[in-house]
Image (tube, rainbow, N blue to C red):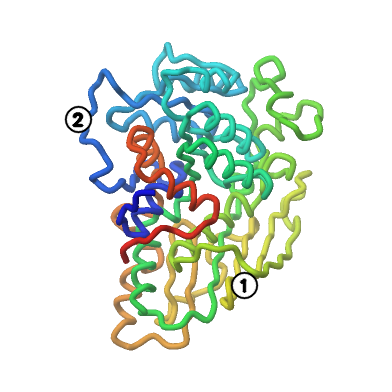
Amino acid sequence: MKTNHYSRREFLGMSAAAAGASLAPKTIVQLPRDLIPAAAAVPTSDPVRFGMIGVGMQGSGLLSQSIKLPGVECAAACDLYDGRHTLAREIVRPDLPVTRRYQTLLENKDIDCIVAAVPDHWHKQVVVDAVTAGKDIYCEKPMSHSPADGVAMVDAAKRTGRIVQIGSQRVSSQICAKAKDLISQGMLGDLMLVEGWLGRNDPTGAWQYPPPPDLSPRNLDWDTWQGTVPKRPFDPNIFARWRCWKEYGTGVAGDLLVHLISGMMFMLGINEPPKQASAVGGIRRWKDGRNMPDVHAVLYYYGELPVYMRLNLGLEGNSGGDRRRADLLTAERQGFGAQLLRPQLPPHAAGSVRRAVAPGERSEAGTGGDARNDLIPGARLRRCQAASVEFLRGGALPETRG
């Protein structure tokens, strides 16, 4: 395999994962310039053409921003709910081809790559089918609905040699990148504990989204949407609030914890699973029929480093009071907090650490990044393909600078 001498940040930002656009829809973290063709160099007769699978809350945001990239076109869109066919055409163009069958997009030889924003229980099948059909794919986080699904996805990516990107905006965060730089310079000394939290305190944050008012089995392929899980009668709330049920979603772990863990691993340069994990939690507030916890706390050991993560859908953001002391590095925005504790910060460094990532402060590019700006050039310029797949499988990163 050819070795590319990209920094770890550049490599992760361009090939391992990237951002959920809905949190920072106008923020794009670019590929290294030698991998991006200038807009003028992309002939209008040869655009990168992508297919959109899933045009819901997340998918419509991804679609809206993807079509703004130079030399990029949406060739077709797929959703099992017909109302989103109308939405896709409103976003792209009135004559956009739309379908309920995502396989139609995979069979289209004019489509170069896929952008997928589907419920968690569909991630594995869509990714495996896409790469098997010869398509590169960006899929929203979390990567998989189960560990077994994740293994199948990685095996398919290795077998086919296609690019697979999984959305994870902390890995594209400029705040987290600054924290990574400070940590790598030794400014925090020896880490004693990593603590992170995310909280929400309203029905929308707890996924109590209203179903589309016209939703019915006539305009929704309910049986196909349920996939391989045991079938149940049509329920519009399950369609709109699928994250609340383990059959379809992964709860606060797959929606929120994945951000804390991926951001921490990026900042600390960790590329291995924890050796221990234990969790507590339950349905403490939102007793609406869901079967996934709304309170979830996890204690990990990454090597000898203890990591404590907590998630709470009954409490907003930073629940720890005023903890902005000189011995904490806090990356915090829109309810996100992650603390890297150390025994003592050198006096000369305290001000620079606080100023670099002060709580509530926006970096120039915000917290999120945008994976589609990585994937779509990658559909044509596939130089990081082998290393990207190896990272997804959990292997060591290639030799890098910094």
Report the side of 157 relative to 216 (left or right).
left
Report the side of 80 relative to 117 (left or right).
right
**Which of disc 1 and disc 2 is earlier in sequence?**
2
Task: State the residue position of label 1.
Answer: 301
Q: Secondary structure at mark 1?
A: strand
In the figure, 237 relative to 401: above or below?
Answer: above
How many residues crowd mark 2 within 10 Å: few (<14), some (14–19), many (20+)? few
Report the side of 365 relative to 230 (left or right).
left
- Residue 194 is marked as none
x 46%, y 25%: residue: 51
In the image, 43 versus 328, the foreground residue is: 43
In the image, 48 versus 180, the foreground residue is: 48
**How far across and down, in percent of the image, does residue 164 sit?**
48, 41
Q: Quadrant of the C terminus?
A: bottom left
Cβ–Cβ below 8 Å for labels 2 and 1? no
x 34%, y 32%: residue: 380
The kind of residue tagged 2 is Ala
Q: Secondary structure at mark 2?
A: helix
In the figure, 376 relative to 30: above or below?
Answer: above
x 63%, y 54%: residue: 253
Residue furthest to the left in view is 40
In the figure, 296 relative to 206: above or below?
Answer: below
**How far across and down, in percent of the image, does residue 276 sit?**
67, 69
Residue furthest to the front in view is 1
**How far across and down, in percent of the image, does residue 193 sit?**
54, 77
Task: Calculate the distance from the C-alpha at mark 2 to the C-alpha at mark 1.
Answer: 48 Å
The kind of residue tagged 1 is Tyr
In the figure, 251 relative to 400: above or below?
Answer: above
How many residues crowd mark 1 within 10 Å: few (<14), some (14–19), many (20+)? some
Task: State the residue position of label 2.
Answer: 41
